[in-house]
Image: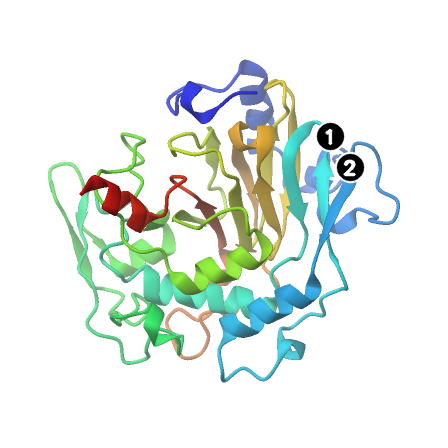
Amino acid sequence: MATIKNLNAHDRPPEKVRATYKKYQHVRLSEIEQDPDVIDLEKLDQDDLPDPFIILESLSSEGLREAFDEFMGKGHLSHKTHGTALIEGVPVIAHKRVSGLRMIPSLIPPTIQSKLLSLMLHRDLSDPSHQTNLHLHYDIQYPNVSNHGSGTDDTKDTPQSYASFFEADPSLALTAKDPNIHKAITVQNMLDKKLRWVTLGGQYNWTTKVYPDGPPPAFPADIARLLGAAFPETDAQAAIVNFYSANDTLSMHRDVSEKCDVGLISVSIGCDGLFMISHDDGEGCEVIRLRSGDAVYMSGRSRFAWHGVPKIIPETCPTWLRDWPGPEYPFWQGWMSGKRINLNVRQMTDAKPNQDAALAL
C-alpha cells in the first residue's frame, strides 16, 4: 500500500483518469440521469445493493442526534426539528474497487447544513486568520464588527466576533496588490464568483502545496465536535471550504501534503455535484452524484486516490436551502440557489496542534 510519504502533490493523474474527467466535464445535463456509470446514492436500494456495493456498517443514530443537538445549541428545541428524521442506524456504503471509501447519503440534516453555512460563511470567512484564494492577489478589507453576531451562542468557540461579508456594502472595493495585473473587485464580485475557497485551521498553501511552518489557527471547535461524532478517527485540524457555481470544476488531484494517513472528510451542501475518485489500481474511476447533506470519508487506499469534481449540476439546490442567507440579508437572499459548498476536512499530523508547538520548544 502507498504511504503519504511516497507521493507527490505535484504529480499528474494517469491518462485514463484524465480522459474520464474530461468526459464528465463536458457531459450534457440531460445525459447524467441516464448514465449507468454515475452512482446516485439516493437511488441505491440499500436492501438490495448491486455488486460492487456493500453496507460496511451503521452509524449510531442516537450518537448523531446528541451531536446535532449540541451543535444547534441551547435555544434549539430538539432533534425532532432538524428537518428530517434520522433512521435507526445510518448506513455506510462501501465500494469494492475503492478500498476505504465510505459513502453516507443524507448524513447531515437540513438544520445542521444551514447552521454550518452560517458559521463558515458569516463567522469563519470573516476571520482574517483564514486565508482565501483571493489573498494572494488582493488586499482584503474586512467588514466592521458584526451587528448580527456569529450565528452561534457558543461564545467560547468564537473569542472574537467579525462582521459577515454578507453584511458589507456589496460595492466595497477589494484593491489589487498589483493593479497592472489584476483589476479591483467588489464584495459582490467576490461572493458571486471570485471566491473559490477559504481555509480553516491549518492554512494550506495551494500554490506551493505545503503547510506553513508554525502553529496554525485553531480549527473551529464546534465544527470539529460535530464531525467527530460521525468520523471519530479523524482529528479535524485543517479544512478547505470550496465554493462552486454552475460550470465550476475541481481538477483531479491527491491530498498528500499532510504528515499522516488519517482519513479525509467531505461534506456537500447545496447543488448536486459529480465527484470522481480513482480505483485502487489508479486507472479506472467511479463517478458519484453527491447531493446536499451527503458525506464521503476517504480512508485506507482511497486516502491517496485521485479525486475531483468535473461537474456541478445547476438548479438542484434543495428548496428549503435556496433562500439562504434569508431575508435578514435582503441583497443576498437566495444566494445558495446556484451554489455548491463543499467542506473538506483533514488531519495534518498525528500530534495535536498544541503538541506540535510544545515539541518545537
In the picture, measured across the screen, residue 134 lies left or right of residue 150, that is: left
Residue at 29% of width from left, 43% of height from top?
356
Name the foreground residue: 285 vs 167.
Answer: 285
From the top left corner, tell me how far across and down residue 35 is, in percent. 74, 35
Q: CA distance from mark 1 to mark 2?
A: 6 Å
Residue type marked 2: Phe
* Quadrant housing the N terminus: top right
Residue at image coords 53%, 21%: 18
Q: Nearer the viewer, residue 356 or 157?
A: 356
Label 1–label 2 contact, CB within 8 A: yes
The residue that appears at 39% across and 25% down in the rendered structure is 9
Q: Can you name the residue that lies furthest to the top here? A: 15
- Up/down of 350 relative to 26, above or below: below
Q: Residue 67 in the image: state x and y as whole percent.
A: 56, 67
The local secondary structure at tag 1 comes to loop
Can you identify the residue that label 1 sits on?
96
273 left or right, relative to 211: right
- Secondary element at image label 2: strand
Q: Which residue is mark 2?
A: 53
Residue depicted at 65% across the width and 42% down the height: 102
Residue 140 vs residue 322, the one in the foreground: 140
Q: Amino acid at mark 1?
A: Lys
Residue 160 in the image: x percent, y percent?
A: 24, 70
**Residue 84 x %, y %:** 68, 70
Residue 267 in view in this figure: yes
Is 326 above or below relative to 355? below
